[in-house]
Amino acid sequence: MNIANWLYQAALSWPERPAVLEGERVLKNYRELLQAVCNRAAELSTRYGIGEGDRVAIFAKNAPEYIEILHACWWIGAVAVPVNAKLHPKEAEWIIGNSGAKLVYTDDGNLFSNTPGVQETKVAAPVEARAEVTPPVTANADETAWLFYTSGTTGRPKGVMITHGNLLVMSLCYAMDVDLPRCDDHMLYAAPMSHGAGLYMLAQIRAAGRHLVPASRGFDCDEIIALAKSCGNLTFFAAPTMVKRLITASKQVGYRGEGIRTIVYGGGPMYANDIDEALELYGPRFVQIYGQGETPMTISTLSRDLVADETQARWRDRRTSVGIAHACVSLQIMGPNGEVLGPNETGEICVKSPTVMKGYWNNDQATADAIKDGWLRTGDLGHLDEEGFLYLTDRSKDVIISGGTNIYPREVEEVLLRHPNVFEVAVVGEHEPEWGEQVVAFVVAEPGASLSHEILEGWCKQEIASFKKPKRYVFIDELPKNSYGKVLKTELRTRLTSAG
């Protein structure tokens, strides 16, 4: 089933319901949204030559048009390739090239004018086509709908093939385990629509609910508070660091969550004190989820009632967990040889579910490494307790999570190592109160060479996205290594802790 059928049916059933808002202003009802999607679908076909299976990239900030573009792609059987708007254009260009995208939507419309074989247009450019309203093309459950790029330990992103079937089951799990969508809800897109916030759009579409893109096109605490008061029934996804910032801002103005119905948090660790403080101010408005691109938004969930509960004997432990397996998910903890471990034994978190990706785009080896005997090896370490609650012990490899965004050390290390004056480098995460973690680079200079924070800051500014750049550099004579020559990052983290 083509996931775009949900929009088609919602618009036929409830044509006059408000659909898309920018701030408080209603831009389109469902009848108008359906017409806009059909117009864009016609433009993709006739003007840009996009057909079934072709990839269309979106490298832009959140925008009301984002919903139209995604559905227009699916309407004609094309594959959407949403790209993190915070990436450097060079990084986005690599993803566009790897996906083989024939068209890219951007904010400016001229970022990739010199990229061979790629057409480009503005997200907000007027659509000239005026099409007849028709249903979307038929699609099988195993056909790719969304190509989601997530970095791996090699430093190069991998394209996760998310199918129409994956999106269908993911959305049903949202309605069953996370939050039941309602037509009078305002789903707020303050977190990137290229990621979890955009994935959650689909359940809201099915309910013919409202989609609200803030005027700032991002996460602004004062704006969210104002929208909650004026619009009401806000539901949105936020990283734990965003929740912390919102609670801090709310305390400053005496706001206690009125108008917010549900905040779904995930994408990084939520510290116990932070969720306690949030619950004390806002009350039971919080749901936790744990997932990854390879099984989008669906590994485990801690429901609103479980987050807020203080009646059970082990409520404190439960609140620090990432919840129980989603309704559609089988969870196992496996040892290094694939053996299934028992309660409270730490191992790799493995998932079997209809939400698990089809595989990695043009990367059979990576797919085979990730999915064994039908089980997705997440690369994350954790354990299950006797009651089925999942606890994360560590994130995969040495990934740094800053503001809910994954930053992969090797990717940053490779950029720094390209500088002619850098001999060796190791990148680790350091705790930072507002963002969760910040990037720190330990750098060994070439003999006789000169390096400084300013030199490397300027270098990184030209090569990678701003959020990936090290926040500070520690210049040392040599990196600590074991007898096999492997850099001891644990020791480097200890140095940071000791120095702090």
Image (tube, rainbow, N blue to C red):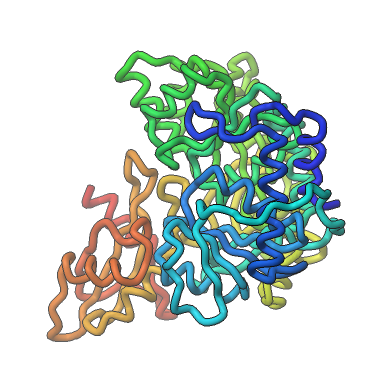
Q: Is residue 187 above or below residue 476?
A: above
Residue 122 point in image, percent of width and height: 49, 58
**Nearer to the camera, 291 or 463:** 463
Is 439 positioned to the left or the right of 211 in the image?
Answer: left
Q: Is residue 337 visible?
A: no
Question: Of 53 and 34, which appears nearest the observer?
Answer: 34
Q: Give residue 348's position: percent from left, percent from top.
A: 65, 56
Q: Residue at x 74, y 39 (%)?
A: 326
Residue 190 drawn at (x, y percent): 48, 38
On the question of residue 361 being in view, the answer is yes
Q: Which image quarter: residue 263?
A: top right
Q: Residue at x 70, y 34 (%)?
A: 30
Number of marks in picture: 0
Looking at the picture, tell me which residue is in the foreground, 99 or 103.
103
Q: Is residue 302 above or below residue 451?
A: above
The residue located at (39%, 60%) in the rendering is 490
Q: Position of residue 292 (x, y in %)?
A: 62, 52
User: Which residue does the image show at 60% across and 45% down from the upper left?
Assistant: 198
Please identify the quarter of the rendering in which residue 33 is found: top right
Is 362 situated left or right of 490 in this image? right
Residue nearer the viewer, 148 or 69? 69
